[in-house]
């Protein structure tokens, strides 16, 4: 990637690398491989931060960073302590939500995914602030209209789906 002809090409390559590493981290977590998940998540963060350094207009790069930030911010106390000890940071839920919102509004490649992730994060945050539930339902409703064949979006809107 360092031999890419320009910053934009380098940023694009780093964005896709970061995206792949993020998905790999999520799969490792789901399989219970927490150390691998942490290593891949840190590599994802580094790739996306390098992409932003190469091209500060890479709005889509913010989604992976937001998910990383949000997960750390909302992890258990013990998990946050371990994350800080091994150098993963502590997370910031407000910054994460703002980044998710920005990508859901202005993203080019990750806009749909950002809207879905943002809606789910807002629904989770509605446990702290019930007013956020309506915004989560609005976003999911827009996705359900845009993708009427997707049952996941419709299920989110059902009374039992969106708590």
Image (spheres, rainbow, N blue to C red):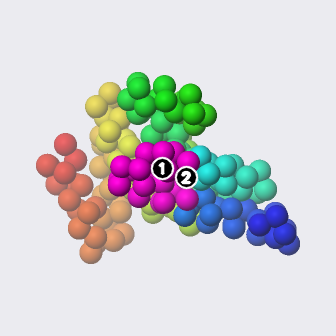
Residue 31: % across, % down: 35, 55
Q: Residue at x 35, y 35 (%)?
A: 125
Q: Is residue 26 magenta?
A: yes
Q: Residue at x 61, y 34 (%)?
A: 87
Q: Is residue 46 visible?
A: yes
Q: Residue at x 32, y 39 (%)?
A: 124
**Relative to 41, residue 91 above or below:** above
Residue 117: % across, % down: 41, 52
Residue 102 horizontal side relative to residue 147, left or right: right
The reply to whether the C-beta atoms of the residues labelled 1 and 2 are less than 8 Å apart is yes
Residue 130 horizontal side relative to residue 62, left or right: left
Q: Residue 40's mark?
A: 2
Residue 155: % across, % down: 20, 59
Task: Please state the extent of the stretch shown in magenta in the rendering.
Answer: 21-41
Spot the residue most to the bottom. Answer: 149
Q: Quadrant of the C terminus?
A: top left
Q: Is residue 134 magenta?
A: no
Q: How many marks?
A: 2
Spot the residue most to the left. Answer: 160
Secondary element under disc 1, as helix, strand or loop, is helix
Residue for badge 1: 37
Residue 65: % across, % down: 57, 47
């Amino acid at each position: 990637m360092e031999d890419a002809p320009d910053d934009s090409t380098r940023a694009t390559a780093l964005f896709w690398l970061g995206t792949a590493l993020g998905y790999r981290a999520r799969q490792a977590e789901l399989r219970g491989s927490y150390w691998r998940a942490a290593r891949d998540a840190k590599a994802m963060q580094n790739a996306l931060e390098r992409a932003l350094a190469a091209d500060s207009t890479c709005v889509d790069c913010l989604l992976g960073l937001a998910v990383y930030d949000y997960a750390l911010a909302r992890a258990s106390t013990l998990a946050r302590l371990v994350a800080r000890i091994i150098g993963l940071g502590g997370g910031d839920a407000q910054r994460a939500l703002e980044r998710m919102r920005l990508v859901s509004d202005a993203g080019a490649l990750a806009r749909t995914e950002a809207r879905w992730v943002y809606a789910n994060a807002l629904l989770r945050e509605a446990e702290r602030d019930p007013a956020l539930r309506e915004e989560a339902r609005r976003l999911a409703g827009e996705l359900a209209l845009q993708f009427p064949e997707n049952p996941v979006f419709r299920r989110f809107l059902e009374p039992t789906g969106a708590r």
